[in-house]
Amino acid sequence: MSIATRTAGPTGLNAVRATAGADAVDHPAHPSPVVVIDLARVADRFRELRALLPWMDVRFDVSALAHPALLAALAADGAGFVVSHDSGLPVLQRSVPDARGVLYATPGARWPRRRAAWESSVRRFVVDDARDLDEFATAPAGTAVLLRLHPDDAVAAARYARALGVRIAGLSLRLPLAAGDDQLLDAVQSAVVASGRIAGILGERVELLDLGEALSGPMAGPSAHVAALGRSIRGIVAPATSRIGVIASAGRSVTADAITIVAGTAERYADAATASEYIDAGAEVLVLRRRRRIPRPARARTTWSPAG
């Protein structure tokens, strides 16, 4: 996965100068493609999700687009973060110095990478293999683990964690982006049942249920769809009585329609992955810090590609 991680002038010198007069994107100083990030659009989408799901801890997945200006703007708006790819962590560290509330959810991560995150003050980690719990046996106070396992395996892992003295904070779902509504709700139901069993083993309640990338998968779509699924999930989890907090990662769903590739007089909508590839290849980045209309592509989002 390509992540926007330019460390030397990550917004580009010309882009920084142009940001002050961001009305002119088609700037003669940019003969090569420029990645335009509309922070106002990103903020609007993030706020919309939080308004639709006020009882849920909606976070930004840094792996969608790890650009310092984007992360800093979201942090200023009160956003929390999830790291599901290690390349995004250094950029997050520079943009959001206090990483104590960050959820480290990189699949298949081994201890050296987790330790680097821990040294950055990250204290919540998602684990995909019960054998990895050994690594947390000597973790400092405040470190907690979320189990991204089949519910039955999660219950067994909780028993092992208790023997090791590892704190289990909750469960994390792993769903394909193509998962349907029923698949998501079934997974939530199974996780709630498993959380009850784990609470009995640990002698204390399970605090969290992480929905993973549900907001970019089964929960992606029109506001009415997001709100309806949210109500169904809330009815299953019953956070007011179960006291289980729900986390969901928003990445592509937040950056949608907020990124444009500009080359000469041509402007094309781009998804976060495409933008990251351009940035990693050395493209300048123009950060729009105030509202400006950028023409959206005429064709459907799902069929557009950089090739045209």
Image: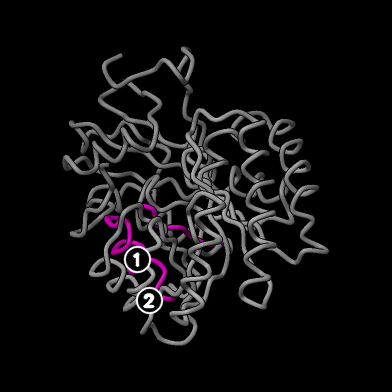
Of residues 158 and 219, the one nearer the viewer is 158
At x 46%, y 78%, the residue is 166
Q: Label 1 to label 2, Cα distance in Å?
A: 8 Å
Where 94 falls versus 248 (above or below)?
Answer: below
Counting labels gives 2
Residue 67 placement, left or right of 102: left
Where residue 252 appears, as percent x and y from the top left, is 47, 38
Residue 215 placement, left or right of 280: right
Q: Which mark is residue 136?
A: 2
Question: Which amino acid lies under the numbered mark 1 shown in the image of this protein?
Answer: Asp
Element on which disc 2 rests: helix
Whether the residues at callouts 1 and 2 have beta carbons within 8 Å, the answer is: yes
At x 24%, y 36%, the residue is 278
Of residues 127 and 90, the one nearer the viewer is 127
Of residues 239 and 37, the one nearer the viewer is 239
158 within the magenta span: no
Element on which disc 1 rests: helix
At x 55%, y 53%, the residue is 152
Say which quadrant the N terminus sits in. top left
- Bin the neighbour count of mark 1 within 10 Å (Cα to Cα): few under 14, some 14-19, many 20 and up: some
Q: Magenta span covers which residues?
A: 79-98
Of residues 64 and 229, the one nearer the viewer is 229
Residue 252 placement, left or right of 263: right
Where residue 37 appears, as percent x and y from the top left, is 40, 42
Q: Which mark is residue 132?
A: 1
The quadrant in which residue 275 appears is top left
Where residue 22 appears, as percent x and y from the top left, is 40, 43
Question: Which amino acid lies under the numbered mark 2 shown in the image of this protein?
Answer: Phe
